[in-house]
Image (spheres, coloured by chain):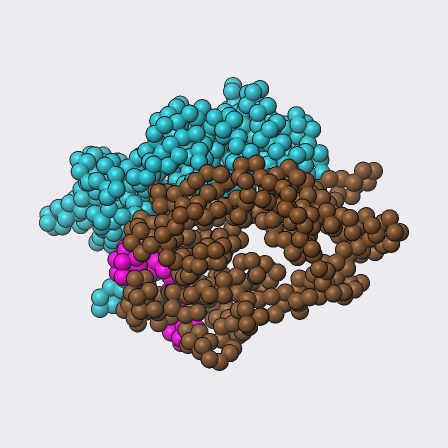
Chain colours: A cyan, B brown
């Protein structure tokens, strides 16, 4: 029974709230937006109307690739969620509960996990056997609804996922009031937190010339141990596979605030292409966050399907593509931002088609068949020098 | 065709190798052991004998719980792996390749991942279509064989897994030559590396009174944000679920070198009990590492199945045990170190039986139904004060 309406304009509120340990402002906008939401609902109640909220539609039908900006964007379609509607009443209540929990979190100047918020909002409704939420799979989509309805990132609501990823390099940052020299982080590195907004993380001194995102933690460690970042003056970071939101948002901030180019180093397989594509254009599922996470200028430095010949990598260390790989590669070839269009996009068609032709994939670790440090001492320096990247 | 022999005595060699960035010694013992292995094989060849190596048996039949020490231990059974044996020749060759790759790694003063070593040792044998290794599933067990045969931890061979986990607290360490104040790590914390041996990590100043291991990164963040470690003078660390070897070894070192008691905080479910049990007594699969990883004195601080009543936690935030949980709980009840014996073990029978009786499990996040910081401000302080732990 969804009714289409136009997208609600949200007026930014005053910035008044401060965090405990820094002087930076946080939550002001979002706190105000939550308050506006609450007022809008209570006004409807006072006016004896059926209370409801407009939620932008999160579906493929409401997503498009913005060619000019180079990111995946959400459209303007919204759905109204009403209280006096049998099919929507529970979701309406859940939306109010999550909004109220988020407001409380901001008021307490705290952050928490989406699982924690689920528990915080879960209770049995007095006089019934009905729970507000039964599973976290009910509260997670409501959080996403709220993100898009308020045009606030989850991180601005104070919510985070399991942290993943690490970074080192020639840069000093302030994290929650502590000054941290990222060139003196030993072998472990600085664990990238989930929430890296500027009220928590501030960038200070930096000698970095670029950012290198490495798919895997184990390969990142080779770069860290060989002190690649010192020789090449760069930030090296990894996201333990598909980089989590914290890592993407941090790169986005360094890229935009410090004008550092971003290079992505992934396995040569469809999953690697996909990781690169999410960093660059955003994902279809979370198109609403593209604007604050996607880095259209991110460059694909490797591994390329042409690297096998370029670097004379023995066939024995390749892995045959399976059916799923082939299907996935063909799907990616049809992404408008990869294979479909003409002009500068052609190299991408060649890249993916060449992998399909060879019929093999190649992991970053395969370079170790030459030498443990081949990747840091020869492979990457040569590719950077010869500008062997795609964008 | 395995022949039982007695366990080979390994004589520690001289410590001569040093790492690049610290003055601590590394790899001396292990390098010597690898050399001894190579000499033993070449001596057999020179003497025109069938070359072979003795590998301690890694099977349940060769594992026992050492009641006095409180750890799971490997027995003395070994199997001989020969070159002139059709069923063993390939494995013999693979063992030599992995040993040689490890020796090279130590010689180059580098560390790498087990996947990387697989690729390093993988090649097509000249004049054949046969590969030395086809899958990593072939090289991983050989690495474990070598660990037990040399009585060297994988980390001493310079091999690591994907890093996982973070730590903060009132302690200063040296990591790979960099001095790091773990009380000034912001919101992210110090990412615990996979290799934490004393040639890489050294402990300097510390005001910590105990160590708190928290199962989940998201809950750890609550403790970090609320600065629990500052108020209670402790190290807080997490391992992102089942803690990886680096986290276990680091705790072991802090526990033994600095005499810090260890408290384990996990979900109240069979998986949580199992995580605690591995920290405490080691695992059956990797019994040979117990001596250098297991912490028999580790205490289980929660969550306990009795906490629901103690802290008046609403039923709505519990989760019903499923069949697998019940089966797993009964299995754990039969572990000799939990339920089987009399005396001080009785409380553990009560703990697990009470969970079975209630028929529900409880996650750490469930405490947030009371308040976001209930866990750091009330739950844990009360349990510590009232000594409500099991060991």
- Residue A121 placement (x, y as % from top left): 28, 56
- Residue B317 placement (x, y as % from top left): 32, 63
Rendered residue at 38%/68% (across/down): B389
The reply to whether the magenta stretch includes residue B376 is yes
Rendered residue at 58%/70% (across/down): B65
Q: Is residue A119 something that shows in the picture?
A: no
Closer to us: B240 or A309: B240
- Residue B123 placement (x, y as % from top left): 73, 39
Tell me if residue A24 comes above or below residue B332 in the rendering: above
Closer to us: A122 or B137: B137
Rendered residue at 31%/69% (across/down): B386
Main secondary-structure element of the magenta-colored stretch: helix
Q: Is residue B252 something that shows in the picture?
A: yes
State the count of labels.
0
Which segment is the magenta one?
A: B352-378
Tell me if residue B284 comes above or below residue A211 in the rendering: below
The reply to whether the magenta stretch includes residue A187 is no
Is residue B355 rendered to the left or right of residue A88? right
As drawn, the residue found furthest toward the left would be A46
Which quadrant of the figure has residue A280? top left
Tell me if residue B187 comes above or below residue A135 in the rendering: above
Query: Quarter of the image containing the N terminus of chain B?
Result: bottom right
Is residue B110 rendered to the left or right of residue B380? right
Closer to us: B244 or A125: B244
- Residue B365 placement (x, y as % from top left): 34, 58
Is residue A183 rendered to the left or right of residue B8? left
Rendered residue at 55%/33% (across/down): A226
As drawn, the residue found furthest toward the bottom would be B342
Is residue A94 rendered to the left or right of residue B305? left
Query: Quarter of the image containing the C terminus of chain B?
Result: bottom left
């Amino acid at each position: 029974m969804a009714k289409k309406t136009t997208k609600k304009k949200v007026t930014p509120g005053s910035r008044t709230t401060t965090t405990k340990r820094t002087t930076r402002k946080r939550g002001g906008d979002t706190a105000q937006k939550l308050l506006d939401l609450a007022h809008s609902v209570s006004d409807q109640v006072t006016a004896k109307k059926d209370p409801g909220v407009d939620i932008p539609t999160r579906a493929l039908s409401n997503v498009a690739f913005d060619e000019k900006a180079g990111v995946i964007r959400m459209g303007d379609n919204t759905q109204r969620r009403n209280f006096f509607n049998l099919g929507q009443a529970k979701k309406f209540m859940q939306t109010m509960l999550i909004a109220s929990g988020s407001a409380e979190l901001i008021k307490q100047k705290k952050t928490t996990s989406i699982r924690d918020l689920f528990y915080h909002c879960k209770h049995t409704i007095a006089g019934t056997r009905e729970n507000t939420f039964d599973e976290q799979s009910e509260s997670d989509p409501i959080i996403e609804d709220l993100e898009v309805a308020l045009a606030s990132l989850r991180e601005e609501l104070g919510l985070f996922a399991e942290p993943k990823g690490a970074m080192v390099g020639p840069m000093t940052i302030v994290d929650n009031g502590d000054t941290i020299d990222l060139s003196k982080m030993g072998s472990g590195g600085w664990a990238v937190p989930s929430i890296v907004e500027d009220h928590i993380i501030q960038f200070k001194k930096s000698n970095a010339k670029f950012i290198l995102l490495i798919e895997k933690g184990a390969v990142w460690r080779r770069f860290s141990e060989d002190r690649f970042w010192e020789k090449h003056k760069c930030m090296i970071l990894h996201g333990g596979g598909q980089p989590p939101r914290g890592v993407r948002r941090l790169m986005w901030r360094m890229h935009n605030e410090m004008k550092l180019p971003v290079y992505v180093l992934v396995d040569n397989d469809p999953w690697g292409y996909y990781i690169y594509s999410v960093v660059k254009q955003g994902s279809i599922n979370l198109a609403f966050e593209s604007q604050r996470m996607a880095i259209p200028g991110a460059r694909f430095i490797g591994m390329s399907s042409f690297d096998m010949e370029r670097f004379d990598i023995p066939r024995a260390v390749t892995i045959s593509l399976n059916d799923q790989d082939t299907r996935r590669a063909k799907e990616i070839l049809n992404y408008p931002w990869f294979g479909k269009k003409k002009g500068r996009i052609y190299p991408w068609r060649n890249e993916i088609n060449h992998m399909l032709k060879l019929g093999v994939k190649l992991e970053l670790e395969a370079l170790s068949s030459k030498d443990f440090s081949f990747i840091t001492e020869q492979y990457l320096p040569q590719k950077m020098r010869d500008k062997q990247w795609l964008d």
